[in-house]
Image (tube, coloured by chain):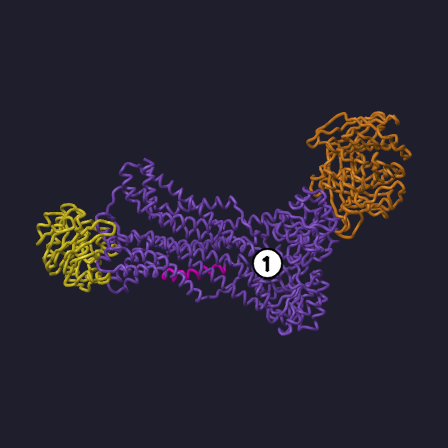
Amino acid sequence: MIGAALQALASHWRRHPLQLATLLAGLALATALWSAVQAINAEARASYARATAQIGSGALDVLEAPGGPIPLPRYVALRRAGWQLSPVLEGRARLGDLRVTVLGLDPVTHPPLPAFTAAMKRDAAMLGRMLAQGGMLIAPPDLAAILTDVPGLPKVQVSDSVPPGMVMTDIGVAERLLARPGQIDRLLILPDQPPGLTPLADLAPDLQRRVSRAGTDTARLTDSFHLNLTAFGLLSFAVGLFIVHGTVGLAFEQRRGMVRTLRALGLPLRLLTALMLGELLVLALIGGGLGLVLGYLVAAALLPDVAATLRGLYGAPVAGGLSLRPSWVLGGLVMALAGTGVASAQALWRMVHMPLLSAPGLQAWAQRAARGERRMALAGLGLIGAGGVALVLVPGLVGGFALIAGLMLGAALLLPPALALVLHLGRRLARGPVGDWLWADTRAQLPGIGLALMALLLALAANVGVGTMVSSFRLTFTGWLDQRLVSELYLTARDDAQGEEIARWLAPRSDAVLPIRSGEFTVQSVPVTVYGVVDHPTYSKNWPLLEQTPNAWDRVNAGAAAFINEQLARRAALWSGDRVQLAPGWTLPIAGVYSDYGNPTGQAIVALPALLSHASAVPNRRFGVRLSPEAMPGLMRDLRAAFDLPASALIDQAGLKAQSLAVFDKTFVVTGALNLLTLGVAGFAILTSLLTLWSLRLPQLAPVWALGLTRGTLARLELGRSLLLAALTALLALPLGLALAWVLLAVINVQAFGWRLPMYLFPADWLRLFGLALLAAGLAAALPARRLYRLPPSELLKVFANAR
Amino acid sequence: MRARLALLLLLLAALPAYGQGYAGLGSTAAEGFAVPDPETRLNFPRDHGAHPEFRIEWWYVTANLTGPDGTDYGVQWTLFRSALAPGEAAGWASPQIWMGHAAATTPRHHYFAERLARGGIGQAGVSATPFAAWIDDWQMAGTDFDSLSLTARGAEFAYDLDLIAEGPLVLHGAGGFSVKSADGQASHYYSQPHYRIKGTLTLPSGPVEVTGQGWLDREWSSQPLAADQNGWDWFSLSFDSGARLMGFRLRGARGDFTSGTWIDAEGHATALAPGAFRAEPLDKTEVAGRSLPVRWRVTLPDRGVDVEVAALNPQSWMGTRFAYWEGPVRVSGSHAGRGYLEMTGYE
Amino acid sequence: MLLTIEDVKKTYPGARPVLQGVSLTLDAGQTLALTGESGSGKSTLLHLAGALDSFDAGEIRLAGTALSGLDDTGRAALRRDRVALVFQQFNLIPSLTVGQNLGFHARLAGRQDPVWIEELTERLGLAELVARYPEQLSGGQQQRVAIGRALAARPALLLADEPTGNLDETASTAVMELMLDLVRASGTALFLVTHSDRIAARLDARAHLSGGCIA
């Protein structure tokens, strides 16, 4: 009996291979995008965790000198006072043609590190080579391969236990590579301190203790980025499930007769249900498996860009290689199973509760649709409201995403009622029987195609929203770059001595030489970079201030006030007129807040003499040079010749802007790719829902055809109907997308990056997207329409015959 | 004292890998390091300072102390120097590594601590005049070698002791040139075993005023241990008669090797012929998961010595990066007295 | 002659010939019953007469128009203007109410006559049902709506293919009576495919299809 039933059930798929393909494709797409995002996230998180373990000091508190390095004698003095500390010197250095992070440690006092331990295990004499005999660089394999051939560097040791883009070495070697002799960036406070020590606050009141945070800085900084990706993955998954829902619903609908027959033949309902559940399980596993393969490919294609973004934006150490991790593989399969379950629940429920004999419905489709749409409208409004409440209750990133989820899902649920209303109004305007029928029939189709339209709505709104956000961001960013990068030439000297020399050399040859000097400070236990600027109109005329107090620049130039960037202002809740403590004994009023879109960290600007009086050892290697553009090529040539500077040490304004924009664009490559994929999936959802509705459409079209409409007319009307629905959906997606953009700009971005951006509107983009939506809907409708146009009349006539 | 030389080498070589990879050290050649020379005449106070051209060196104090209630205590203070390359340089470029061990032992408890430092930056070092040896906040210093103050602290103990020398320096071997084996290995080696000590020992239960005697060893060399030797038992005993005995037993595949020095009450030292000094384990006790002999019969027939040496606290285990047993002992039998015992290589 | 069928042949692709030279005529206002075995081609002939499908050979003239010369559009126009159809099932447009269905063909043909539709509605007993949707009606009710819709357009020819085939005996008789009454009253010609001799006997003429030819 089971065998026969299985055969009967399977025969449906043999007869409808397209339906089977659609179902599997829907499942695979949903699983693929979700898994891809999860794979990327898992890879990045694993990289952070690995880096934290490899750097090995994540859980320790550290001591830092506000504004600059800690001189070596301070470390020794604290040691001799009994404090168990370990020094770290870290910086970016150019080794050969590569810019790498050099992490200098004292292997003798540092807590055990995987990279060192592994190296010693292989070779007991390693310590001798690390500390003496010219030193040793421990580098990840890719870096090591390149660095080995660079002349003048210490020997290179390969280790898998060093984060990407980083070289670990003895602090003595690091100070040579970084040209920072006798300097220490931070002191790790080791776990076991003897009792009875003089408190650090008394011994070293000028040093700040930064408490270790739960999790790493990178993980904290990049959380928002990953949450973003996850949200996109979930959106794609939901859109994919619309396809599954539609196909499963149709397959069950079409098998009603078969189910009735099987039950009439004595197959117990329970067994039948179990068989159909098993069938769904198998399909889910196949589709989910395909999706995992697809997801792996998508992730592998996207990961290099994501890694580049994370490295560029957050300095997060992420490698570009993807590995198969049980977490996202299993997660993807579970999502595929759960998604299939959710998408099929309604169809299964209907099948189980289907009466053995059919009877005319008590309620007409119009009433059922109206009731369903009322429910949807209520649920939609409820969801939007819940999203708003969530933002109030849980402010921050999670609340922001809850608002977005509520907004998007709620709006999706509101779509069918809204479309029904529009169609109702449209019918009133209709002239003639065909128009009348067309509106009514479109209205009647709505429940069937509604899910696909919801998918389209979500994809379009996401496109408008994210597109508006990214474009607004880009416009603001470009304008900001114009304000911020005023000097015609930017140069970096090898060290402070050369810096001074170059500055002297440049003084008579240019309009102005503006040193770019900064030190690391801590404000409210968060690292903040403080820049010291000289009094020059370049700054006061151009600097992009969001708000300022009277005579702001005069006060800052006099050393009596500071500017802070928007990130710091928002994070520390400090605005113009407040006071900011940059270091113990150095508190300044805030003269203004400036926009700063280059990085997610805090910054402040003070007068250079003020900075130097609190941090004498800030490097003096970078300069902005003002001069007439015509003089630039000659000056650059002379500079290179006079100081033997590498090409990378000099960059003109245009070059720097291009670099900045390149980093910016790279950041949103993934967003754009996911956006487009989501739209593609939505287009596919429309196609599948139209294809699956096909066999149900014939009884609706045949009478109209018989009454005197040609197949060509009907095909055109079908196409037009799809375009109309897509157009209406796209129109409704616009306000939703703008609302989404607003939430992204005003809530999510503020949390994720620390800045709020003005929102700009890009009607040309909307028009393009509108065209894209019509194209997608048109393409999706073209196939069924063509099929209708070519359909032999005898097929249409079969509808009326008893043979059905 | 060859045993301690090996200990130092093992410790420092093993240090970064924390117990890994000291195998093979016994055969490492001394590349570019100075070699102990029998023609060298020790010159004080200069030779109280460091000799960075030699591979290894130490300043090693052990003390037997007594509290006001008659309770016995032991104290250890050690500064090891190990060079990755010969010579000294300023800053991180220095090839010198320093390691400090400190311990305080009571009949019931044993507390210890460890410190590590790079040379060249001032975190650890030794200067001869005025004399100072230090690592972090641990210090042994004084205007000269005869009058020193000694401090150290760990998580559970601290001490601050004054050391006054009541006898002359003792040069081991020939004028401080101490031959170690038939293969010709040797070290420069002298001791000051005559310190009278007074000071404060701080324990978790509170500070204790203590008095007693201390023994300081100074040794430097460049030559490592023979490959087959896997452990040693080292004794420094001070008898109530005023005489002192240093002796050790090296346990190796080629059989045990013993040697030592007899110091009479006036401080005159006589090197012992190999095999003259004997030590037999009597009782074993479970310490840190291994079985160690904490009661010994020590004999030196030439001098009529036949004594039983028993640990004050059998659990005097130094759980440092390279672990060993080092603690105060009581001496009874033909001679009564106190001293220190060090044991390594018991697995 | 309203309808002339001359030596019409029809073969569906990949099947044996259905009609092998059928000829038949029908006057305006005349009623004709076409009977025959299952699969004898009755329905096919009716479809051809209604300009629903094309034929391979011969000619059909409807109200003076030769169907062989018509394309899809021409056939559709003819269906709209000259004929009305009642099938065994699925006659009605599901998305329109009974009232809208009743008026649909008439509006399509441009001959909407509210008084006539009102009368038909009354006579077919559908007054209570105009606001309902087809799926809410019983089979008999649905067929009455289909007849009403067909006649509301005042066609020259009503083509009916087993209009009561899906109904039980009582309903079948009632619906058929009503249809014949209305057809006669309105002077519409009727081409009825049926397997019932009893019904066939009540019409003006009768033809029997067998082996692809009129017997």
In the image, taking residue B204 as reference, residue A748 lies left or right, namely: left
* Shade of chain B as shown in the rendered figure: orange
> How far across and how far down the image is residue A743, in percent?
47, 59
Report the amino acid beneath label 1.
Answer: Thr
**Splitting the image into 4 quarters, where does residue A425 fall?**
bottom left
Circle 1 — which element? loop
Q: For this rendering, which residue is in front, B219 or A629?
A: A629
Whether B326 is drawn above or below A12: the answer is above
In the image, taking residue A409 as reference, residue A54 lies left or right, namely: right
Residue A402 is one of the magenta-drawn residues? no
Q: For this rendering, which residue is in front, B344 or B332?
A: B344
Judging from the image, what is the letter of the chain drawn in yellow? C
Judging from the image, what is the letter of the chain drawn in purple? A
Q: Main secondary structure of the magenta part?
A: helix
Q: For this rendering, which residue is in front, A618 or A770?
A: A770
Residue A730 is one of the magenta-drawn residues? yes
**Splitting the image into 4 quarters, where does residue A452 fall?**
bottom left
Tell me the residue that label 1 is attached to: A601
In the image, taking residue A240 as reference, residue A103 lies left or right, namely: right
Q: Which residues are magenta?
A: A727-746
Residue B165 visible:
yes
Parent chain of label 1:
A
- Residue, x 80% and y 47% (percent of image)? B86
> How far across and how far down the image is residue C90, in percent?
22, 52
